[in-house]
Image (cartoon, grey):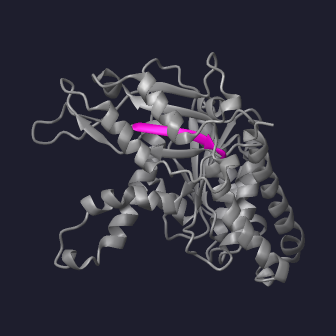
């Protein structure tokens, strides 16, 4: 079982549903620097002021480590950690980085699997120093986690808009669009939880699920651990009439960002795993050859890595989620497809924008006074250098030479 650790307000709100919705997850441990999210562990009373160094150095992580240790000791089976934190602010990026770096050794589980789910801010900007905080947090995640699955707010909003519109509250101002931002936020939170619970960590019909399965399927190179996650959305179906698999595949492909030809040497995928609900596999249109062909075309797999005897695109069957009983539909199920894919194009599109911004700002000394001297003169340039090294590793991985 995995222990989810949600650090900071954004991660707690985005993945609150992880507390109860998967048999492979222990109850989530919520850690924050303030009381406003009702966390299980509070490490401060004033927050971190969007300062990575405050979250990393000033907060004492020992209460959070002790709480994690008690949760692990209370269960018979423990496999690893799933830690999520926002990279824009100070608590998530700083304290989340500290816990990612120290959890395995501090708990005494050096072989435990580490899944990092950083919540990446909107490209339009959440804070003035988000590029520094993001670079520092992502560099730590790539160094210490076995698999990094970023939850990108820009991408999540595009996926969740239909969900938010459908859930729009019918109040006196519903025609004016006043509630739209709230509904979109709720939709984003539901979509993030569903992607993780109903696919990435879904139940296995054979009972042999391992938390290392996604890692071995999607991270063939330890220097390229960034894995994108996307979701088809929930599709309702009855046991006698399973949902249409190809319609679910079309809904999934819409959420996969289109790859441009501007940089063809980085538009390649090095590994993927598709999680499919069993009712979709039982439906008449399901043909793995068709699914495989369409996914390979969209993801643009690196041809020099492909071996027909050992395909880098895998799929596995997962149990669907039971739908709430209502108006005689208690036997209905919610099926879905969830795709994990390690793409050089997706990874570099995540890393390069904050890297360019952080590099430009660091070169002129912008906002460095916001941090302690060691962070401003040592940690930030090291993190920038490390992430540019990850970008080069992806370019090398998909280069046919």
Q: Nearer the viewer, residue 117 or 240?
A: 240
Residue 377, image x and y in percent? 89, 73
Q: Which residues, given as a range, are shown in magenta?
A: 337-344
Residue 208, placed above or below residue 218: above
Residue 161, image x and y in percent? 35, 61
Residue 208, placed above or below residue 153: above
Residue plotted at (27% across, 76% down) = 177
Q: Nearer the viewer, residue 255 or 366?
A: 255
Picture quadrant of residue 372: bottom right
Residue 179, image x and y in percent? 29, 74
Residue found farthest to the left: 327
Answer left or right for 46 relative to 248.
Answer: right
Our reading of the magenta stretch's main secondary structure is strand
Residue 276, placed above or below residue 389: above
Answer left or right for 127 relative to 183.
Answer: right
Answer left or right for 186 relative to 84.
Answer: left
Residue plotted at (47% across, 61% down) = 13
């Amino acid at each position: 079982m995995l222990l989810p650790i949600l650090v900071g307000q954004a991660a707690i709100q985005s993945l609150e549903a992880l507390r109860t919705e998967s048999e492979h997850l222990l109850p989530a441990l919520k850690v924050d620097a303030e009381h406003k999210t009702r966390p299980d562990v509070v490490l401060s009373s004033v927050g971190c002021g969007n300062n990575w160094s405050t979250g990393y150095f000033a907060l004492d992580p020992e209460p959070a480590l002790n709480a994690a240790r008690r949760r692990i000791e209370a269960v018979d089976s423990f496999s690893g950690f799933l830690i999520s934190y926002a990279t824009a602010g100070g608590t998530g990026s700083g304290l989340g980085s500290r816990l990612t770096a120290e959890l395995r050794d501090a708990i005494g589980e050096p072989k435990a699997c580490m899944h990092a789910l950083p919540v990446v801010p909107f490209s339009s900007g959440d804070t003035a120093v988000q590029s520094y905080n993001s670079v520092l947090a992502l560099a730590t995640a790539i160094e210490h986690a076995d698999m990094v699955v970023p939850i990108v707010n820009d991408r999540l909003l595009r996926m969740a808009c239909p969900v938010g519109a459908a859930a729009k509250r019918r109040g006196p101002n519903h025609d004016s669009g006043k509630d739209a931002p709230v509904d979109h936020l709720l939709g984003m939170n539901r979509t993030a939880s569903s992607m993780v619970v109903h696919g990435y960590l879904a139940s296995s019909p054979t009972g042999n699920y391992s938390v290392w399965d996604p890692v071995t399927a999607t991270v063939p190179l330890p220097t390229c651990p960034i894995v994108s996650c996307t979701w088809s959305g929930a599709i309702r179906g009855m046991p006698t009439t399973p949902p249409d698999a190809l319609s679910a595949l079309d809904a999934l492909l819409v959420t996969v960002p289109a790859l441009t030809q501007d940089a063809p040497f980085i538009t390649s995928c090095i590994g993927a795993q598709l999680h499919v609900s069993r009712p979709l596999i039982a439906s008449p249109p399901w043909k793995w050859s068709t699914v495989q062909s369409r996914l390979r075309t969209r993801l643009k797999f690196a041809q020099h890595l492909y071996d027909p005897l050992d395909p880098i695109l895998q799929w596995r069957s997962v149990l669907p989620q039971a739908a709430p009983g209502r108006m005689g539909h208690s036997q209905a199920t919610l099926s879905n497809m969830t795709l994990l894919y390690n793409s050089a194009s997706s990874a570099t599109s995540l890393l390069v924008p904050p890297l360019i911004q952080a590099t430009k700002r660091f070169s002129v000394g912008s906002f460095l006074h916001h941090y302690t001297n060691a962070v401003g003169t040592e940690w930030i340039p090291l993190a920038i250098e490390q992430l540019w090294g990850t970008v080069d590793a992806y370019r090398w991985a998909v280069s046919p030479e």
